[in-house]
Amino acid sequence: MTIASQIKRKVFIGRQSALGTIADTGDGKTYNYRDGGISGGLTKEAYESNTIRTDQQRPNATHGTRSVVKTIDQEFQIGGHTEILEGALRNTFSAAATTGALTTIGINGSTRTISRASGSFITDGFKVGDIVRATGFAASANNNKNYRLATVDAL
């Protein structure tokens, strides 16, 4: 049996309030990681010039920007990587508008369609790729199932 290494480390990722500021620890999330799955560290760029001075010497290299490059080996968790994906996509996730309870909705399991008698799914904010959950159907095989919208039209 192996002994866990890096056991006292905690991976915490938070959102910066502005570029260059340290993230507020109250706004982030602690992430799980695999044993030995953290590597990397602080790096500093160095800039060198090819200029030759009048004394026939080259100028010294200068320090550039510092950055932290970390690799975290972890398993993907459902709903567990929202902040990371928001950062990569440069936008926040938000819940789409819902229509609430629709008494005129019908689900056809064989054709895999959801339809309504009046109103508009488009006006209500439904888009292709959205996940909808059908609930509240009495004794229906289509009850409490998630559906990904492939196409959307008004009815």
Image (tube, helix red, strand yellow):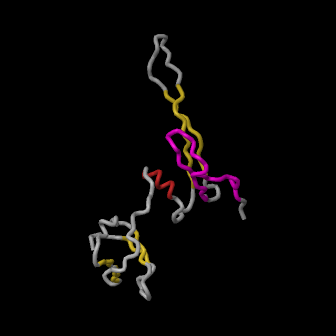
Q: Position of residue 133 (x, y in %)?
A: 42, 74
Identify the residue at image location x=53%, y=48%. 15
- The answer to which of 56 and 117 lies nearer the viewer is 117
- The answer to which of 103 and 154 lies nearer the viewer is 103
Seen in the picture, residue 135 relative to 14 is either above or below; the reply is below
What is the span of residues highlighted in magenta in the rendered image? 4-32
Q: Which quarter of the rendered picture does the N terminus lie within?
A: bottom right
Q: Quadrant of residue 116?
A: bottom left
**Residue 97 visible at all:** yes
Identify the residue at image location x=46%, y=24%. 49
Extreme top residue here? 55
Q: Which quarter of the rendered picture does the C terminus lie within?
A: bottom left
Q: Position of residue 7 (x, y in %)?
A: 70, 55
Would you say residue 99 sits in the magenta stretch? no
Q: Position of residue 52 (x, y in %)?
A: 45, 17
Indicate left or right for 38 with 146 as reference.
right
**Residue 151 visible at all:** no
Identify the residue at image location x=49%, y=28%. 47
Q: Position of residue 59 (x, y in %)?
A: 50, 19
Seen in the picture, residue 106 relative to 132 is either above or below; the reply is below
Identify the residue at image location x=34%, y=81%. 106
Q: Main secondary structure of the magenta part?
A: loop
- The answer to which of 105 and 45 lies nearer the viewer is 105
Seen in the picture, residue 126 relative to 103 is either above or below; the reply is above
Seen in the picture, residue 8 relative to 19 is either above or below; the reply is below
